[in-house]
Amino acid sequence: MLVGGIEAGGTKMVCAIGEIDEVSLKERENIGAVQVRILERVSIPTENPAKTLPRMADFFAGRGIKALGIGCFGPVDLNKKSNTYGYITKTPKEEWADCDMAGTFQKALGVPIGFDTDVNAAVLGEVTWGVAKGCDTAIYITVGTGVGVGVYCNGDLLHGLVHPEAGHILLQRHPKDTYAGRCPFHANCMEGLASGPAVEARWGKPAIELAACREVWEMEAYYIAQAIVNYTLTYSPQKIILWGGIMHQEQLFAMVRNRVQEMLGGYVQHPLLQGSLEAYIVAPGLGENPGIMGAFALGLRELA
Ligand code: ZN
């Protein structure tokens, strides 16, 4: 059986087809028991809906997929009772505002469509098949062009009023940070202070050219750690998955873990939170694929 997945991003749309053994179909109530292999994947530039969506639909048309999952950049409407369920709502990418993502593919392909945020898809991928498999509460944080946080809570993706926007959590400024921040909404939110473009604007060079500059990463770790401490205190996750372009500076993991330990101050008591936090704050288990695997899981959940 074939399943489709879309990782819908602001610069590219990754579309993929996954294959599942027929025998494992019966097990689909427990999606984690199903093995999915990525058969084919394309990347289509995100231009505008009129141009981009038909190219994406063409990729899946006639391929016999039984379901499609979409992990989409947001904000999006995830309320199934809403008239605009499955839409991208208000976004700085104006041409995509009020775009009916789920409905477009439902009409084009006639299969069940699973739909959620890009980061919720990524955390679902990791709890289904990756490093957080078996956790009932986990967080996926991506620190890159923006900062996004997917939340899996008590065995399901967290939506609530809209969906978590924990990348915009307000942080205490580093005493030495004079950079104004780049979020148009908040003076001191995580995305505004810690995203890749914020690092570049603050230090005058892209992150990749600052690898040897300890001061840069100490400040970055200070911000990421504050956010993780707040998520630890509010969501009580069993695993925190940290990724995105900025985390390719792998020295950051140890710096973040140390800072988290220091900022928690020993307040939360659990064996996982003792010592170096290497089993608590981790890189994805699915490499570069948590988003697309999570999209497959969204599609399979809808089918089940
Ligand atoms: Zn913000």
Image (cartoon, rainbow, N blue to C red):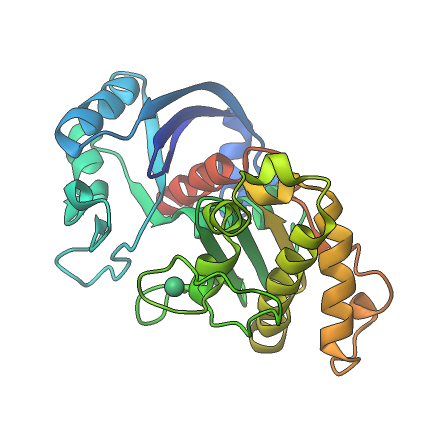
Rendered view: 230 above or below 196: below
Total residue callouts: 0
Does residue 280 appear anywhere in the picture? no
- The quarter of the image that holds ligand 1 is bottom left
In x, y percent, where is residue 178?
Answer: 52, 64
In the image: residue 296, left or right of residue 62: right
In the image: residue 140, left or right of residue 4: right
In x, y percent, where is residue 264?
Answer: 72, 76
Taking depth in this image into account, of 218 and 154 the one nearest to the observer is: 218
Rendered view: 47 above or below 122: above
Quarter of the figure that contains the N terminus = top left
Rendered view: 42 above or below 118: above
In x, y percent, where is residue 151?
Answer: 50, 61
Taking depth in this image into account, of 113 and 159 the one nearest to the observer is: 159
Q: Residue at x 39, y 57 (%)?
A: 182
In x, y percent, where is residue 146?
Answer: 43, 49
Q: Residue at x 32, y 20 (%)?
A: 64
Instruction: Name, please, the residue furthest toward the bottom.
Output: 267
> Picture quarter containing residue 168?
bottom left
Q: Residue at x 77, y 69 (%)?
A: 261
In the image: residue 258, left or right of residue 102: right
Rendered view: 158 above or below 45: below
Quarter of the figure that contains the C terminus = top left
Q: Residue at x 45, y 50 (%)?
A: 119
Instruction: Name, please, the residue furthest toward the right.
Output: 275
Taking depth in this image into account, of 131 and 28 the one nearest to the observer is: 131
Does residue 223 appear anywhere in the picture? yes
> Picture quarter containing residue 2?
top left
